[in-house]
């Protein structure tokens, strides 16, 4: 396990250098927009107008649009294997992998997730739903490119111990006294919350952002004030957050960001 992990920790550096020198088209795809770090492809990103597929095709499409951070919902199958899926499963891993998502998209287990991130050495995995950093540490081979949204302080402390960057969920953020001090003491870099929080907690969120903590907001499926949600938050509310869990990654086009 140690040698395998060491190999995959070194591999991204080798591949990245090689890509910069020999494959400018791949190296440039995820760098077209200087704002890529503000957007996480929500459940892989939308594809054909469908959200939450957590599919191989969604990852590829979002990557082609310049995205570099990819959220996947990780859950356990009936036989205890990790797969990317929005809902609770009563299927085995084999059954899950044999069935196309929405009839046409490719499902992903840890083997295919590792392979995809091996082939995209500038991509970052952001996990949701899964509160076991030890299990992910053992099975995801690129911990240096991993952010885990976690739901207990015990899990967050374990992630920090393992060298995994934790993302504090809104329940912990708003349910913890002296949260600014806690974030500073634990050197937390990321938090996540429903976008509606930025209308209700402006003062605190501005202070947190000024301190360098990156707040990513979600639940942007429906328009806000007759505008696409991602565009509305980007244009009007970024003083209260750092980034967006985006379904529509077309927002990374310069004309969408009004550059």
Image (spheres, rainbow, N blue to C red):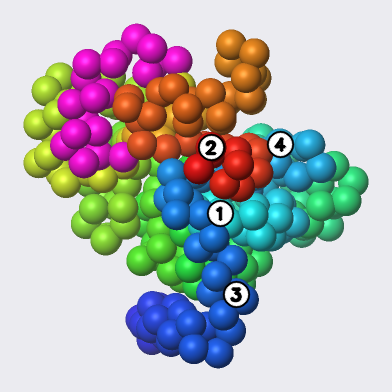
Would residue 118 be found to the left or right of residue 55 on screen? left
| Mark 4 or 2, nearer chain start | 4
The reply to whether discs 1 and 4 touch (Cβ–Cβ < 8 Å) is no
| Mark 2 or 3, nearer chain start | 3
Residue 219 can be seen, yes or no: no
Instruction: Please report the residue visible at 62 percent of the width from the left and 58 percent of the height from the top.
Output: 63
Which quarter of the rendered picture does the N terminus lie within? bottom left
Other-residue count near label 3 (Cα within 10 Å), few / some / many at <14 / 14–19 / ≥20: some
Instruction: Please report the residue visible at 31 percent of the width from the left and 40 percent of the height from the top.
Output: 214
| Mark 1 or 2, nearer chain start | 1
| Mark 1 or 4, nearer chain start | 4
Front label number (3 vs 4): 3
Q: CA distance from mark 1 to mark 3?
A: 13 Å
For residue 51, which numbered disc appears in the image?
4
* Residue for badge 1: 67
Magenta-highlighted residues: 196-214
Q: Is residue 168 magenta?
A: no
SS majority, magenta? helix
For residue 26, which numbered disc appears in the image?
3
* Residue for badge 2: 258
Instruction: Please report the residue visible at 75 percent of the width from the left and 56 percent of the height from the top.
Output: 57
């Amino acid at each position: 396990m140690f040698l395998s992990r060491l190999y995959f920790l070194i591999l991204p550096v080798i591949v990245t250098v090689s890509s910069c020198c020999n494959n400018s088209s791949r190296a440039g795809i995820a760098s077209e927009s200087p704002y890529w770090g503000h957007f996480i492809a929500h459940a892989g990103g939308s594809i054909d107008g469908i959200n939450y597929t957590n599919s191989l095709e969604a990852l590829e499409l979002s990557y082609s649009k310049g995205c570099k951070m990819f959220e996947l919902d990780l859950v356990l199958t009936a036989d205890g294997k990790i797969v990317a899926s929005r809902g609770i499963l009563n299927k085995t891993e084999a059954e899950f992998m044999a069935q196309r998502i929405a009839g046409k998209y490719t499902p992903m287990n840890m083997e295919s997730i590792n392979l995809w991130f091996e082939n995209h050495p500038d991509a970052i995995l952001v996990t949701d739903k899964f509160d076991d950093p030890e299990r992910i540490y053992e099975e995801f081979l690129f911990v240096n490119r991993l952010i885990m949204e976690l739901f207990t302080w015990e899990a967050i402390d374990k992630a920090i111990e393992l060298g995994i960057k934790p993302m504090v969920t809104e329940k912990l953020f708003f349910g913890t006294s002296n949260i600014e001090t806690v974030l500073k003491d634990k050197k937390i870099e990321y938090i996540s919350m429903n976008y509606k929080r930025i209308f209700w907690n402006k003062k605190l969120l501005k202070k947190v952002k000024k301190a360098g903590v990156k707040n990513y907001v979600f639940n942007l499926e429906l328009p806000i004030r007759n505008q696409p949600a991602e565009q509305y938050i980007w244009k009007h509310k970024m003083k209260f957050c750092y980034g967006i869990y985006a379904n529509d990654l077309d927002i990374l086009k310069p004309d969408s960001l009004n550059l």
